[in-house]
């Protein structure tokens, strides 16, 4: 969803119209609240925020799976080191 100019609200205006802004957000809009002319916070629907958090967790899981796959490829290719020796070398540093 693209942010429109009307969705960028100064903090002073947001304070005065919070109830109306909340209704707009619940209806699907997202608002950027500015402070001193710069973006400060965003006002989004709580369900949408939960959805964003779930997407981020899924992305993290995919990255971890990719890293595990790289590790397994390293094992298959013989690119391994003895863990005890590697830790001992690190301790000497």
Image (cartoon, rainbow, N blue to C red):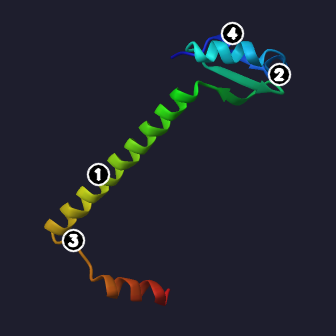
**Dot 2 corresponds to which residue?**
15
Q: What is the number of the mark on residue 66? A: 1
Marks 4 and 2, how far apart at CA:
16 Å
In the rendered image, residue 81, in percent from the top left (x then y), is placed at 26, 79
Q: Residues within 10 Å of mark 3 (few under 14, many from 20)?
A: few
* Mark toward the viewer: 1 or 3: 1
* Mark toward the viewer: 3 or 2: 2
Marks 1 and 3, how far apart at CA:
17 Å
- Using the rendered image of the protein, determine whether residue 19 is visible from the camera's viewpoint: yes
* Mark toward the viewer: 4 or 2: 2
Which element type, helix, strand or loop, lies under badge 1? helix
Q: What is the number of the mark on residue 79? A: 3
How many marks do you count on the picture?
A: 4
At a point 39% along the width and 84% down the height, the residue shown is 87
* Mark toward the viewer: 4 or 3: 4
In the displayed structure, 70 sits above or below 12; it is: below
């Amino acid at each position: 969803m693209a942010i429109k100019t009307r969705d960028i609200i100064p903090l002073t205006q947001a304070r005065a119209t919070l109830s109306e802004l909340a209704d707009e957000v619940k209806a699907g809009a997202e608002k950027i609240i500015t402070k001193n002319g710069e973006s400060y916070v965003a006002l989004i629907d709580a369900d949408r925020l939960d959805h964003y958090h779930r997407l981020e967790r899924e992305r993290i899981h995919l990255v971890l799976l990719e890293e595990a796959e790289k590790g397994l490829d390293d094992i298959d290719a013989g690119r391994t080191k003895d863990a005890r020796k590697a830790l001992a070398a690190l301790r000497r540093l």
